[in-house]
Image (cartoon, grey):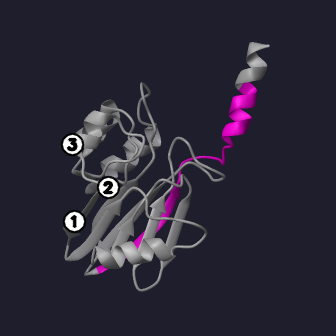
């Protein structure tokens, strides 16, 4: 069995990786990141934890945008996995499905929306959410498991749901 940790939208600048992300990365055979590391420090930290495959996101530093492709297809145990930052447009997954077809990928891992999505149809479409800046969801990542040519994907919750507005309001209250 091959275990793959999928991440996206870590959005960390000076902060360390969350402990739960480090633990999951150490348990995985590979790490996929669908963009928006934001800093080189996070990219390097994930690279040190294991085999990292990544694409750039819209919020990444220019040095990362130059270094990383916009999209990538990798083959893991005979399964083609597409990796992009933005694949979800509107209220459905038609764009993600079309992108997976265009990339000839059996699985598409994407980010940008900061909330987890798993859609199992002809192809597996999965957004791991965000471990640090979730939107209307709990902080999360995804774990993909490949066994004998079959792939399963699931969301791993990394904490309680968080609303950025509530955090912002709490910080304002501290300043008063």
Q: In the image, what residue occupies the spot 34% across and 48% down? A: 25
**Circle 3 Cα neighbour tier, 10 Å, few/some/many (<14 / 14–19 / ≥20):** few
Tell whether 18 sits left or right of 91: left
Q: Is residue 36 above or below residue 117?
A: above
Q: What is the C-alpha distance between the residues marked 1 and 3?
A: 17 Å
Q: Which residues are magenta?
A: 150-170
Pointer 1 with pointer 2, Cβ within 8 A: yes
Which residue is denoted by mark 3 in the rendering?
A: 67
Tell whether 140 sits left or right of 168: left
Pointer 1 with pointer 3, Cβ within 8 A: no
Residue 152 x %, y %:
40, 74
Chain-order first, disc 2 or disc 3 = 2
Chain-order first, disc 1 or disc 3 = 3
Q: Is residue 114 above or below residue 3?
A: above
Q: In the image, what residue occupies the spot 32% across and 48% down? A: 56
- Residue 71 among those drawn in magenta: no
Residue 6 x %, y %:
38, 57
Say which mark, if any, is on residue 74: 1
Can residue 44 be seen by looking at this rendering? no
Which residue is denoted by mark 2 in the rendering?
A: 32
Chain-order first, disc 1 or disc 2 = 2
């Amino acid at each position: 069995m091959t275990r793959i940790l999928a991440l996206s939208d870590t959005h960390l600048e000076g902060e360390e990786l969350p402990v739960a992300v480090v633990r999951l990365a150490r348990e995985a055979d590979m790490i996929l990141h669908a963009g928006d590391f934001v800093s080189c420090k996070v990219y390097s930290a994930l690279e040190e934890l294991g085999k990292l495959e990544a694409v750039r996101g819209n919020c990444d530093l220019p040095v990362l945008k130059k270094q990383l492709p916009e999209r990538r297809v990798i083959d893991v145990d005979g399964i083609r996995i597409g990796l992009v930052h933005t694949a979800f447009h509107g209220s459905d997954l038609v764009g993600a499905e079309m992108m997976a077809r265009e990339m000839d990928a059996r699985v598409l891992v994407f980010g940008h929306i900061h909330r987890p999505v798993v859609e199992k149809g002809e192809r597996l479409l999965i957004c791991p959410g965000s471990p640090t800046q979730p939107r209307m969801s709990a902080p999360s990542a995804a774990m993909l498991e490949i066994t004998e040519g079959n792939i399963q994907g699931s969301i791993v919750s990394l904490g309680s749901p968080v609303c950025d507005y509530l955090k912002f309001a709490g910080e304002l209250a501290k300043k008063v």
